[in-house]
Amino acid sequence: MHEIPQQSQSQELSRNVLSPDDLPQPIDRPGVDFIQEPQLRDSNITLFVSEASTGIEDPVESTSEQAEIESPSENDPAPAEAAKQNNVYPKYIYRVSGNTAPVDLEQLDKDMHEVLQERRDTLHFPNEKPLTDEEWALLQGEHDGIVAVGDELGVDLRDRLPRRQDYHMFDSQEALSEDATPRFGEGATVNGGFQHPEAGVVWARRDDYVVDTTGLVHETAHAVAVDTLAMNVISETVDENGILHRRMDDPKTDSGYCEDVTPNANDVVILTEIATEMITARAMDYAGHNNVHFSYGALDAIADAMIHEAAEHYDMPPRELADSFMRGALTGDRAGIILLQEAIGEERIALLEQATDVDNDTGEELARTMNLPRAVRAIQRDREGRRMGIFQWD
């Protein structure tokens, strides 16, 4: 049986920062201030950085040096190991560029959790229609399913679950687009549902029980998955008291899972989405649902076939590889997707990632090109109105 590679302590620490070349361009949004005391002010956050921790005596200009992370003391457990002891992993991975002084990532994480929640608390769309009591009761059952999946994968998701006020419901796609596109962009709203750390879950009702339930669970799975907050230091100055004042661009949010896998985040965007689909399907199974609407259809079938082929390549149970793949979406761990890439090959994965507007016909052609007969059969069953029979590992 092939052993799933484990990250070393140094790897677990170093994945929190990358060089500026790996970062997306900052978006034109209000910046984030870091000054003397941690407090909320006008949706900005502040962070105290002592003179001793900066080593800076004079005002400085920002450079493109990457952030540093101080090593834990000999008496303290490594952050990664301490988290694993309680199955609690960081929700956010931070990538800081343009700074000259070390960044206190623990304090940054605390402050960003506060500012993002404050933005969620103050968000309101004019045309949104609140969750009904029946919808909220249904979602609480789905939450139990998501928590059960996390427990099975060794990741405690309880503190990541959206609150009732974090769900923003619309009665039509048009209403959602009108309200949300100006703030979150057409790419987020075009499909009638999305998740964002500053919004929570946004969904346009379809009046279809299976589609609505699956869609809400899918976006909730995104809400509990790991995110990257990419931040760029605009300026750093030190005042007469030796206190560092740092100003950062407002964070750009991306999937930490896919960005941590390959140098180019776009290489595994679809695979990242499908990992969330797999979490959704298992959560709904735990919640007692017999029917699941697979958002990506033929692409889901292709990913299912890839995992089965890779598991056979490594002589390991498909469920073991699938679990590692899903765990990565919740923790940022690369192990499962690296195994998949090595077994399937970059060329075939590139074919999947380059696919757009895939229906059953083009999906079946893609599956044949990728030499995935299992996917071809699943797509044919779906065309005939039967269940695809995917994401079943036992």
Image: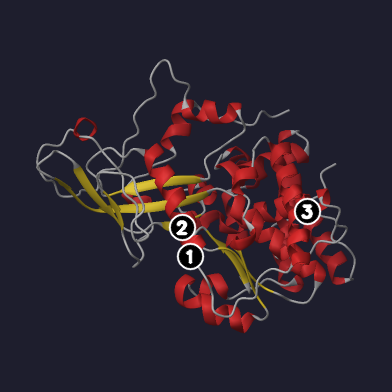
Residue hosting label 3: 141
Q: Is label 2 in a helix, a strand or a loop? A: helix
Q: Residues within 10 Å of mark 2 (few under 14, many from 20)?
A: some
> What percent of the width, then of the height, locates residue 241?
12, 39
Q: Residue at coordinates 60% horizontally, 44% vertically from top-left?
A: 159
Q: Which residue is mark 1?
A: 122
| Cβ atoms at labels 2 and 3 below 8 Å apart | no
Q: Is residue 300 left or right of residue 83?
A: right
Looking at the picture, the colour scheme in use is secondary structure
Residue marked by disc 2: 118
In this rendering, which labeled residue sits more in front, label 2 or label 3?
2
Kind of residue indicated by mark 2: Glu
Q: Residue at x 28, y 37 (%)?
A: 102
Q: Earlier in the sequence, mark 1 or mark 3?
A: 1
Taking the image as shown, residue 258 lies to the left or right of residue 53, namely right
Looking at the image, residue 351 lies above or below residue 203: above
Q: Is residue 221 above or below residue 172?
A: above
Residue 140 found in image quarter: bottom right
**How much space separates mark 2 and mark 3, taking CA atoms?**
26 Å
Badge number at residue 259: none
- In the shown orientation, is residue 243 left or right of residue 253? left
Q: Quadrant of residue 351?
A: bottom right
Query: Which marked residue is nearer to the observer: mark 1 or mark 3?
Result: 1
Q: Position of residue 6 (x, y in %)?
A: 57, 29
